[in-house]
Amino acid sequence: MSNANVSAGAPPPAGTPLLSVRGLETRFFDDGMALKAVDGLSFDVARGETLCIVGESGCGKSVSALSVMRLLPPPPASRVDGTILLEGQDIRALSEREMRRVRGNSISMIFQEPMTSLNPVVTVGYQIAEAVRQHEGKSWAEGFERAVEMLRLVRIPEPERRVKEYPHQLSGGMRQRVMIAMALACRPRVLLADEPTTALDVTIQAQILELMRELQEETGTAIVLITHDLGVVAEMAHRVVVMYAGRKVEEASVGDLFERPCHPYTVGLMGSIPELGSSLVEGKGPRRLAEIPGIVPSLRAMPAGCRFAPRCPLATDRCRTEMPPLEEHRPRHWSACWHWERAQEAIHVHA
Amino acid sequence: MSTPENLAPGVVPPLLDVRDLVKHFPIRRGLFGTPAAKVHAVDGISLSIAAGETLGLVGESGCGKSTAGKVILRLIEPTSGSIRLEGRDITTFGDGDMRSVRREMQVVFQDPYSSLNPRMRAGEIVGEPFINYGMGNAGEREDKVASLFRRVGLRPEQMARYPHEFSGGQRQRLGIARALALGPKLIIGDEPVSALDVSVQAQVINLLMDLQAEFGLSYLFIAHDLAVVEHISHRVAVMYLGKIVEVAPKRALFGAPQHPYTEALLASVPLPKPGMRRARQTLKGDVPSPIAPPSGCRFHTRCPYAIPRCSQEEPLLHKVGEGHDVACHLR
């Protein structure tokens, strides 16, 4: 298997991150105004590990993934700063041509909307075979063989027949499987999945999540899973990054995050989701959901100090003027909050 | 507030009573548009909602839950069956009679972006029903709109703004204010919180529940998010391929689901509790096409417990507990 330019040497020693992002900043330019969609994001993901990035619309989670993949509109429309190391190599230094070899080969991406990301006028087999041909220099015949093999791997029934079908002939769940098959066809070491199951029904979501876990166990792929669904996070993540208004506000192992969240935003998110089985444990009626008052700030008018302060029940004058740094408050548990020790009280204020 | 779960059945006539509702969409082919097949979107469902009660209607995409809501609202004509609102059979009402019905039965749609006229000011959108029904003079109408704005958590100053100036959650509040304007008894919500971020979704769910307590509203709450439906509903009906397969008070449905499909749905929901991943039997395959639904029990092609009878004979809804009906040969 040809590895293009990346990772020509020995595999990284255990514990070394496959993908390491440092100080990622993504700006969009609109009417001469610079809008910073991602502001100083850092994260690592190791072989066989799943890192979930959680946050609500507009927090910068999808833009971060697109920045890593270099799939944003080129300058002057946008500008990406920071370091992106893939297996130790700085992929921001690569030319566009070199980057094309990395994409889909060492690092792949799955999008939320399979219908808009698949080419509607060619068969799914062709689309997978094309990637294999491009990246591994295989023949069409070998490419189609791999396509059938990949469709079988993602549990599509009758792969020999399906490989000749067009995207519109497949159901939503099958299209998402085809996306995964395509993303995994060249056995990437890192997979970025942006809300891969959000558009799917729960029974299909369960199948896809299980499939991703099984494939990870088989291939050791590092997965960065972007989602807004805390249920998906709890099931899939080893570690979690919580983003708010373009910044990382908390990072921890999944167990630690759910057990002892150290940021009022994380606490608020957890309190605002109704829980399955709620009717079974409570005597009289459902609890009132915790609300996070207000809305996410606009990129054009970011509050000074902590960006969550205008919506935070714990906010003090300091929060409104001074940005809290991301600090390791407990082993391997970081949060950016002046009042992290009281974060869990944030829920009671509105409950 | 009366809790419908405690009402003895038959004491109070239901606010909404739907019997054997069917909606088939013909698929026309060829030069003369001969109907070649039909989509069995809703295929004989019955349900009732009491005053002050929320009935949740759940199911996966294509199960017919949204079509059911639109047929009940008479936005789509039913193929057959009956819809009674407060005892009146509205199934064959003409436009004139429907005008009075619409005051009592309102709708909130999923997409707050496409269900508000972008050229109208927010105050005009919410106040339009008063003009349509010739209620009050301009000053009185403005006062009413202002109080509706306050009630749904918007500021009266925002009446002069256009829909694009509002956030998604605020737009959904506008939709709710418009639905409330004429003092309806029943609101049909078609995925009313599905497009919202979770923190905003909580605000809108709390608002809907507060309004129900205050005005004694009934809701038909159509959604695919089972945790949200459990939270907001008193009773829940589960649809699969145009049929209701199970209906029960929520505690029974979520605590002891009887239909294999309900079981599978509940087991598929990822829980926000790390380390609690359940040993689940994931359903195989996709929902079959509603153009040619499977024979017998429509779920038999995906059911882990199916026996030969399931593919031959359609199971009917039968009682398995208080207010708990299920359509399965095995229960």
Image (tube, coloured by chain):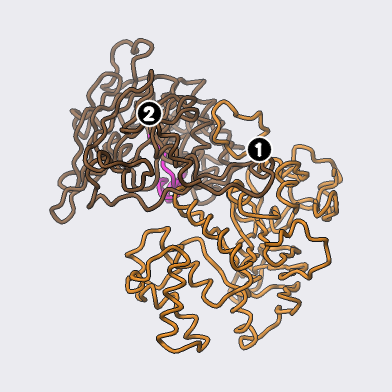
Chain colours: A brown, B orange
Q: Is residue B40 visible?
A: no
Q: Quadrant of residue B291?
A: bottom right
- Residue at position x 34%, y 49% from top? A296
Q: Chain for mark 1? A: B
The quadrant the N terminus of chain B occupies is: bottom right
Q: Nearer the viewer, residue B108 or A279?
A: A279
How far is the residue under mark 2 from the one under mark 1?
29 Å
Q: Could you tell me what secondary structure mostly forms the magenta stretch? A: loop
Q: Nearer the viewer, residue A180 or A36?
A: A36
Q: Residue A113 in magenta?
A: yes
Q: Residue B193 in magenta?
A: no
Q: Is residue A123 visible?
A: yes
Q: Which mark is residue B267?
A: 1
Pointer 1 local density, CA inside 10 Å: few below 14, some 14–19, many at least 20: many
Circle 2 sits on which residue? A251
- Residue at position x 75%, y 43% from top? B257
- Say left or right for B269 vs A35: right
Q: Amino acid at mark 2?
A: Glu
> Does the CB distance between marks 2 and 1 fall below 8 Å?
no
Where is residue A12? Give x, y as percent: 33, 13
Q: Nearer the viewer, residue A348 or B209?
A: A348
- Residue at position x 33%, y 32% from top? A134
Q: Is residue A308 above or below residue B178?
A: above
- Say left or right for A349 vs A297: right
The quadrant the C terminus of chain B occupies is: top right
- Say left or right for B179 vs B169: right
Q: Which mark is residue A68?
A: none
Q: Amino acid at mark 1?
A: Ala
Secondary element at image label 1: helix
- Residue segment shown in magenta: A109-123
